[in-house]
Image (cartoon, helix red, strand yellow):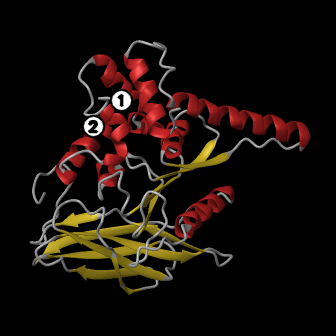
């Protein structure tokens, strides 16, 4: 009767107990195989029935399906682009260490793994091998195709700045979209707690897919930041005209921003260059990122973001792995 993370955890435990020594037990690998076989079926059907074999794909999926998306993209060259959603777990050991610093404990959302004593990552060669096999960062050199990472700013599974633990290790081309005030379902919540439409995430993936199909790239969003006089300064340069540029900012007394409310301020400038001073929350930690909105040639809107940065009450950046400002 197990499903989702509980089922994955069960297969991890069985692998560590010595079952499936060929590595076939961890459920993520059969999930990857199912993706590959689905592509095979599409190729065969389209060639036989349409006379035009489809052999290039853009793959996306959320949560465990996002995990599978990363792993499948490492092994199947037919994947010409991929968009993993709400699976901010690459560099797993560092992610778990960062959760302990930020939350003081592992997220309750990964309880299926802590209950089975899979986290903290056990000592021993087999356990280390398992986590290396399922950590997409192990295959980072294979991720040459375009990729769009889609996250929610308030996803209870992950720390607010989890992306910073692996972003620089992932080769380009790469983009990110972060849906403000959204959790694991990517639906932004209003101040009253009402669930919004996850269209922001889907619009970004639609634009990403259309560009790949047309042999084109999403616009680049380059940003620089500096810290001085107790504040942060951000500057953004985009390769296409921007409709709207925003800074999203949240406050927290700790490094835990899961329940924080993100507020938006417009950036000044345009049409491709923007900048603004980011004042830290008084006596609190501040998390912020920039989001820019574009329009495709057909007028369809889509948004892209920068990484999230965290600064303490004194305006100094707090990076993952540091112990300051818990």
Q: Is residue 8 above or below residue 298?
A: above
- Depth check: 226 or 248 in front? 248
**Separation (CA) of disc 1 from disc 2:** 9 Å
Q: Are marks 1 and 2 in contact (CB under 8 Å)?
A: yes
Question: Is residue 313 at least partly visible in the picture?
Answer: yes
* Sequence-first tag of 1 and 2: 2
Dot 2: within a 10 Å radius of its alpha carbon, few (fewer than 14), some, or many (20 or more) residues?
A: some
Q: Quadrant of residue 159?
A: bottom left
35 in relation to 217, above or below: above
Number of numbered discs on residues: 2
Q: Residue at x 24, y 81 (%)?
A: 277
Out of 315 and 103, give the one closest to the viewer.
103
* Residue position for label 1: 131
Point out residue 312 in the picture as x, y percentages from the top left corner.
14, 67
- Identify which residue, 112 or 55, lies in the foreground: 112
* Along the viewing direction, whichever of 253 and 244 lies nearer the viewer: 253
What residue is shown with label 2? 93
**Residue at the image point whose x is 52% and y is 20% from the top:** 24
Return the x and y of residue 278 as percentages of the image width and height.
Answer: 23, 79
Q: Is residue 226 above or below residue 106?
A: below
Side of 311 where 38 appears, left or right: right
């Amino acid at each position: 009767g197990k499903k989702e993370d509980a089922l994955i955890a069960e297969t991890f435990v069985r692998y560590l107990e010595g079952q499936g020594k060929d590595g076939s037990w961890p459920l993520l690998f059969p999930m990857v195989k199912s993706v590959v076989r689905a592509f095979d079926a599409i190729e065969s059907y389209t060639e036989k029935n349409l006379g035009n074999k489809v052999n290039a794909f853009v793959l996306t999926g959320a949560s465990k399906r996002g995990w599978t998306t990363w792993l499948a993209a490492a092994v199947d060259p037919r994947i010409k682009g991929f968009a993993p959603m709400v699976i901010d777990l690459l560099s797993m050991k560092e992610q778990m260490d960062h959760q302990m610093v930020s939350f003081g404990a592992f997220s309750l959302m990964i309880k299926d793994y802590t209950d089975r004593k899979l986290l903290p990552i056990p000592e021993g060669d087999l356990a280390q091998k398992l986590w290396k096999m399922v950590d997409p960062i192990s295959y980072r050199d294979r991720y040459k195709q375009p990729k769009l990472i889609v996250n929610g700013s308030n996803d209870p599974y992950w720390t607010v700045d989890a992306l910073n633990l692996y972003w620089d290790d992932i080769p380009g081309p790469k983009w990110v979209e972060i849906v403000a005030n959204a959790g694991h379902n990517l639906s932004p919540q209003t101040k009253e707690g009402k669930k919004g439409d996850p269209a922001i995430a889907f619009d970004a993936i639609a634009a990403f897919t259309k560009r790949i199909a047309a042999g084109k790239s999403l616009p680049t969003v380059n940003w620089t930041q500096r810290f001085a006089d107790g504040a942060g300064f951000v500057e953004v340069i985009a390769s296409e005209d921007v409709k709207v540029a925003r800074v999203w900012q949240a406050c927290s007394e700790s490094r835990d921003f899961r329940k924080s409310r993100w507020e938006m301020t417009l950036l000044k400038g345009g049409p491709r260059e923007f900048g603004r001073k980011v004042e830290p929350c008084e006596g609190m930690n501040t998390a912020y990122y920039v989001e820019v909105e574009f329009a495709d040639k057909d007028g369809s809107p889509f948004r892209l973001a920068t990484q999230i940065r965290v600064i303490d009450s004194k305006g100094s950046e707090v990076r993952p792995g540091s112990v300051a400002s818990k």
